[in-house]
Image (cartoon, helix red, strand yellow):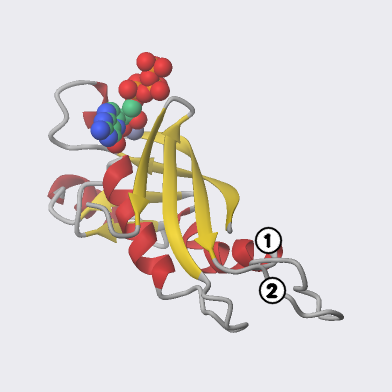
Amino acid sequence: MRITRRLEFDAGHRIPDHASQCRHLHGHRYALEVTLSGNIIDAAGQAVNGMVMDFADVKKVANEMIVDRWDHAFLVYRDDTQVAAFLASMPGHKTVTLDVVPTAENLAAEAFRVLDGAYQDVYGNQLQLERVRLYETPNCWADAVRGER
Ligand SMILES: Nc1nc2c(c(=O)[nH]1)N=C([C@H](O)[C@H](O)COP(=O)(O)OP(=O)(O)OP(=O)(O)O)CN2
Ligand SMILES: [Zn+2]
């Protein structure tokens, strides 16, 4: 069985080598969809009975590990030196420095990497992260899928 929880956040970014508009500083209302697989828990009387994982707990983990960190941050590529230096010159600015260019693909891959270690199979139902889908705009998204490149 698969379940998916969607969360949204706002962040700034730019793609420094982009040939067109995306080389400029701009922002998005991103959406993150976290898909988990596992067996349906059969445990009468327990709060998680009939679930793969409580959606509230899916949200809690994704918020702690990604959304709270990226929301209203500027996501900057480490080697985008001018922008990184500018952001560093602003005391207290919420900046997330990444080892990769902040494309939808790289952000989906980074979110998958972080979240994969965060969802624990505490009920023994083979819970695991299957996919992270990251929408950059309503029309553009990237999927990081377990076992795929
Ligand atoms: N493969 C990728 N291509 C592009 C990415 C990306 O992350 N991966 N990112 C961008 C820009 O950052 C931008 O966010 C996309 O803008 P745009 O193409 O304008 O997207 P829209 O949904 O707004 O497109 P409309 O045609 O205006 O509907 C560019 N490419
Ligand atoms: Zn963009």
Q: Residue furthest top?
A: 20
Q: Quadrant of ligand 1?
A: top left
Crowdedness near tag 1: few (<14), some (14–19) or many (≥20) residues, C-alpha within 10 Å = some
Give the crowd class for mark 2: few <14, some 14-19, many >=20 residues within 10 Å.
some
Image location (x, y in percent) of residue 77:
21, 51
In front: 125, or 30? 125
Does dot 2 land on a helix, a strand or a loop?
A: loop
Identify the residue at horizontal 33%, vertical 41% (top origin): 104
Could you tell whether 54 is left or right of 95 in the image? Answer: right
Q: Position of residue 43 (x, y in %)?
A: 77, 80
Q: Are marks 1 and 2 in contact (CB under 8 Å)?
A: no
Image quarter for residue 142? top left
Position of 143 compared to 85: left or right?
right
Q: 91 or 42: nearer the eye?
A: 42
The answer for how far apart the CA atoms under marks 1 and 2 are is 14 Å
- Disc 2 marks which amino acid? Ile
The residue pinned by badge 1 equals 55
Q: Give the secondary structure at mark 1.
A: helix
Q: Position of residue 13 (x, y in %)?
A: 33, 41
Which is nearer the N-term, disc 1 or disc 2? 2
Residue at x-position 21% and y-position 30%: 23
- Report the residue marked by disc 2: 41
Q: Report if the beta carbon of the residue with label 1 is closer than 8 angstroms to ligand 1.
A: no
In the image, taking residue 20 as reference, residue 130 lies left or right, namely right
Q: Would you place residue 114 above or below residue 131 in this image? A: below
Residue found at x 42% / y 54%? 131
Q: Residue 83 at what x, y percent from top left?
A: 22, 46
Give the vertical position of 30 relative to 61 (above or below).
above
Vertical relation: 90 (above or below) 127: above
- Visible residue check, residue 75: no
| Residue 77 seen | yes
